[in-house]
Amino acid sequence: MAQALAARTLKLADLRAKFGLQRTEAADFFPEWQESLLALTAIEQQAVDRIKANYLYLLEYPVLEIIVKMVVLSPLLDLAGFYAPPFRVTGELEVKVTAADEGEVIQGTIDILALQEKFWVTVIEAKNSEFSLTKALPQGLAYMLAHPHTDRPAFGAVTNGSEFLFIKLASTPSPRYALSNTFSLLNRGNDYYQVLQILKRFGTFVQSTNEIGNL
């Protein structure tokens, strides 16, 4: 019988040992978070400024995961267009990943999963604001390994509200992933301008990839 493991208990070393997952620093592996980003409108900038102001105010008190979703994630996904056709969003989706050689099953729930015709756009793993992104990264990668379309890259992000980190994972010829820079609401200015630009870029990229796949 397969041994069930909770995704939240995993470490990066576990994913390397069980799935052969490796991190790559190749400059051409993950250009989507830096290239072809469209400038935000003044209205979009104002909306992102409001997200930052609201979150920093709420940060004076304990910020639980549900608050992170409401104040940061939901407005950003809305601005990025993930609540409109052709995308649809599901939440709290159970995902199981089976290790290739040990018969183990990694189980957990995805907090927010944006899909386009069953194609995964981005996995958002919301965490309590007191948790570092390094604690969420193995869990997010474990979910992304369950991506059903292994011939296409999977994009994801982990956030604790204050910080945002993007991930790209390719399953073939062997599992590899790369990370973006870390964006923080605690920095001067508003790093989440670029977060919104990247989310919009992912949406455009995935739509074009899906159209090509349907030809």
Image: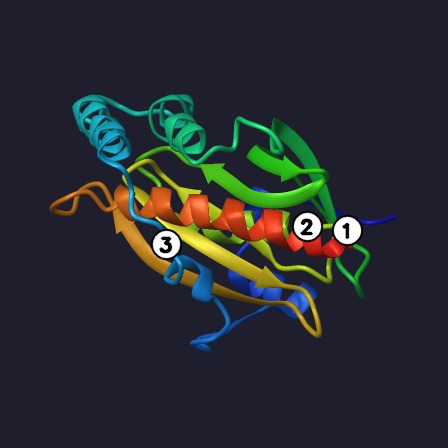
Expressed as whole percent of the image width and height from the top left, the position of residue 11 reads: 53, 57
Q: CA distance from mark 1 to mark 2?
A: 6 Å
> Please, which residue is most extreme toward the bottom here?
26
- Numbered label attached to residue 214: 1
- Between 116 and 177, the residue placed more toward the observer is 116
**Amino acid type at image mark 1:** Asn
- The residue sitting at the right extreme is 1
Secondary structure at badge 1 equals loop
Q: Residue furthest front?
A: 215
Could you say which quadrant of the image residue 54 lies in?
top left
Can you say whether 37 is above or below 79 in the image? below
**Residue at point 24% right, 46% down?**
191
For disc 3, the marked residue is: 37
Task: Please give the name of the residue rendered at 52% of the width and 53% of the height, measured from the top-left corner.
Answer: 138
Answer with the quarter of the image where residue 126 lies: top left
Direction from residue 72 to residue 137 in the image, left or right = right
Residue for point 45% across, 60% down? 32
**Residue type pointed to by label 3:** Leu
Left or right placement of residue 137 versus residue 68 in this view: right
Label 3, label 1: how far apart the Cα atoms are: 25 Å
Q: Which residue is mark 2?
A: 210
- The answer to the question of whether label 1 and label 2 lie on touching residues, with beta carbons closer than 8 A, is yes
Give the distance between the C-alpha atoms of the residues marked 3 and 2, in whole angstroms.
19 Å
Residue 72 on image: x %, y %: 34, 30
User: The disc labelled 2 sits on which kind of residue?
Assistant: Asn
